[in-house]
Amino acid sequence: MNNPGIWILGGKEKAVREAGLGVVVEYAGQHRQPRWIDPLKISWDYTIFATNADPPAPQQTIELIFEKLPVTQGSSTSGW
């Protein structure tokens, strides 16, 4: 964040940003229109963060059970 200005942080696709997936980041003392710069056209590769080491054992394991509950007349669809 070493480039003071007023920037748009949001989705890469213009239509997505214009539909509302974007936020304006404004540095103090800046007085101009927000600016978007297209990101570099590179393929992201999550494997650059990979390692061959075994992951550490968890400190605790918690068993979870997920069930689909039927929605009955008069009940909320959210389950709350």
Image (spheres, helix red, strand yellow):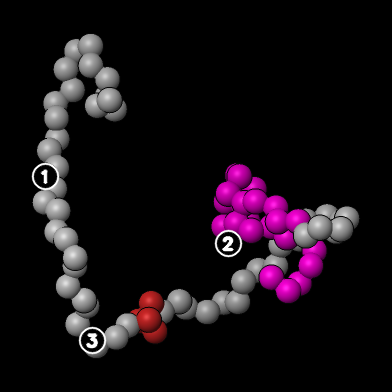
Per the rendered image, the range of residues in magenta is 1-26
Report how far apart the C-alphas of labels 3 and 1 lie in the structure: 30 Å
Q: Residue at x 41, y 79 (%)?
A: 45
Sort mark 1 into few (<14), some (14-19) or many (20+) by Cα contacts within 10 Å: few
| Cα–Cα span, label 1 and label 2 | 37 Å
- The residue indicated by pointer 3 is 53
| Nearer-N-terminus badge (3/1) | 3
Look at the image and tell me in which quarter the C terminus lies: top left
**Which residue corresponds to the image point at 86% horizontal and 58% vertical from the top-left?**
29
Residue 7: horizontal and vertical position, in percent? 73, 60
First reached walking from the N terminus: tag 1 or tag 2: 2
The picture places residue 63, in percent across and down from the top left corner, at 11, 51
| Residue 11 in picture, x, y percent from top left | 57, 57
Say if mark 3 contacts mark 1, CB within 8 Å.
no
Choose between 40 and 53: the one closer to the eye: 53
Mark 3: secondary structure: loop
Residue 17, position as x, y percentages in the image: 62, 52
Residue 73 image label: none
User: Tag 2, which secondary structure?
Assistant: loop
Quadrant hosting residue 1: bottom right
Identity of the residue furthest to the bottom in this view: 52
Image position of 30 with respect to 44: above or below: above
Where, by quadrant of the figure, is residue 14 drawn? bottom right
Question: Which residue carries the number 1 mark?
Answer: 65
Residue 40 highlighted magenta (yes or no): no
Going by the numbered disc 2, the residue's amino acid type is: Lys
Q: Amino acid at mark 1?
A: Ile
Q: Which residue is mark 2?
A: 12
Q: Residue at x 61, y 45 (%)?
A: 20
Q: Secondary structure at mark 1?
A: loop
Nearer to me, 72 or 18: 72
